[in-house]
Amino acid sequence: MLSRTLSATLIGIDACLVEVEVDISQGLPVFSTVGLPDSAVKESRDRVKAAIKNSGYPFPSGRVTVNLAPADIKKEGSLFDLPTAVAILAAQGVIPQERVSSSLILGELALDGRVKTVKGVLPMAIMARKKGVRTIFLPEGNCPEASLVEGTEAIGVKTLSHLVEHLRGERTIEPFHGEGERGIEDGEDVDFSEVKGQEYAKRALEVAAAGGHNVIMIGPPGAGKTMLARRVPTILPDMTFEEALEVTKIYSVVGLLDGRTGLIMRRPFRAPHHTISDIALVGGGSIPRPGEISLAHNGVLFLDEFPEFRKNVLEVLRQPLEDGRVTISRAVQSITYPARFMLIAAMNPCPCGFWGDSRHQCRCTPLQIQRYRSKISGPILDRIDIHLDVPSLSYRDLSAEGEGEGSESIKERVERARSMQRERFKGTGIHSNAQMPLRLIRRYCRLDSECKRLLEVAVERLGLSARAYTRILKVARTVADLDGSSEIRPPHLSEAIQYRTLDRALT
């Protein structure tokens, strides 16, 4: 007796169709699963057997063989419980085979037959639509997620017997219909108008947001570095549908949607602690999963106390910062996760935090300061475009009445600059000035004779490194975009040069 159902497995943030084939034959009672299953899939035999019996259905007494095809792809997770149980019942004639062979089935089984939620339903529903599979049977808690994909019917089931009765025509389960919500606006309700003073820092972050540039902020404790960083997502351009879908897929794979309806529309903001491991930051593990840099995709990754992160943790950021993705290689397969994010790092100027502060005396020796700052390697610093000094605030700044410029007006200027960049890079796969390769820098960052003399002075007299050269040009291009100028002029270049002061301090 042979039966077949359809399920899915994840490869990175995308899904692959899996055929669950069950063969029941005579012989000693044996339940074997083949097709490269992991431990969770192998353990499903006990959950499936108990769920079928406790739901009041017969379990075959002979040999049961479950094949998960294609056999060369690793199968992970507990979502194969429900399709396996349905296939076993179909092989015994309890369920008509024609009712299950063309539907996608997902779900973990409890021992009493209850169906539990699983991760990664959104990419699986997208894959089902592409494969022409119209009906998806899945846990009730995952229905809001699957309903985002138009052209599919998400049918939520509570228990195994609930699904069996539906497939046998004894009851009808209506497809899930969401309430029409199509956007999740998660995040803190913050605004740049709440920031007192720090006009120079606000301007630098506006430039960074307009060009997608990475930023490092240096300042004493309490200067407002974290407060500024948390408000950067409020001035970034709204995500496109494709960006929102990609972010929501990542959060679905990790299991962070929590049954909410709608795409994630606000750009992510992730702020891991400095004790994080390299695997937790970039992704990986024995069962690969996205890390913090992928959770920050299309958003902001904020690393506070930057020099306190372990050196190996910071060094693994090199490739993602350059390529916008991270590839995790294992013996069986390689998985690529998207990781195009805006890095904002924050650090104190010295171990005690008060070097250069006129109101506090620094107790650090020059050697201690040098060791502290040298924790940031040249290759990492090379990938950070804007170095920003954030001084402590005076009483006049703190006690000033009224509010500063709000996020909405800053965002309007950022979006105008980004629209110029979209037109400039149309068809190139480049999304912002920060991603320009050398060939595009030569084309779009041409300097007149006055700008060339100014940049020569900066490189020769200020001691700027060679790696700062292209960064200055990219930032100058963004400043010009904010000014609505098609050409880079001396004021634009001067502003870009002043954002590279840390090059001299760390070299």
Image (cartoon, helix red, strand yellow):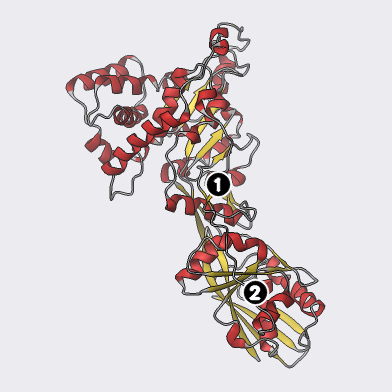
Tag 1: amino acid: Leu
Q: Is residue 345 left or right of residue 31?
A: left
Q: Residue furthest left?
A: 449
Q: Position of residue 292 (x, y in %)?
A: 57, 44
Residues 490 and 504: in front is 490
Quadrant that contains the C terminus: top left
Residue 440: x and y in percent read 26, 40
For residue 218, above or below residue 65 = above
Mark toward the viewer: 1 or 2: 2
Residue 5 in picture, x, y percent from top left: 60, 80
Q: Residues within 10 Å of mark 1 (few under 14, many from 20)?
A: many
User: Which numbered disc covers residue 295?
Assistant: 1
Q: What residue would you read off at disc 2?
A: 173
- On the question of residue 120 being in view, the answer is no
Q: Residue lying at the far front in this picture: please name it.
A: 179
Residue drawn 53% across the image and 66% down it: 125
Q: Residue at x 75, y 92 (%)?
A: 27
**Which of the 4 quarters of the picture holds residue 401?**
top right
Label 1 element class:
helix
- The label on residue 3 is none
| Residue 84, image quadrant | bottom right
Residue at position x 49%, y 67% in the image: 127
Q: Residue at x 23, y 32 (%)?
A: 486
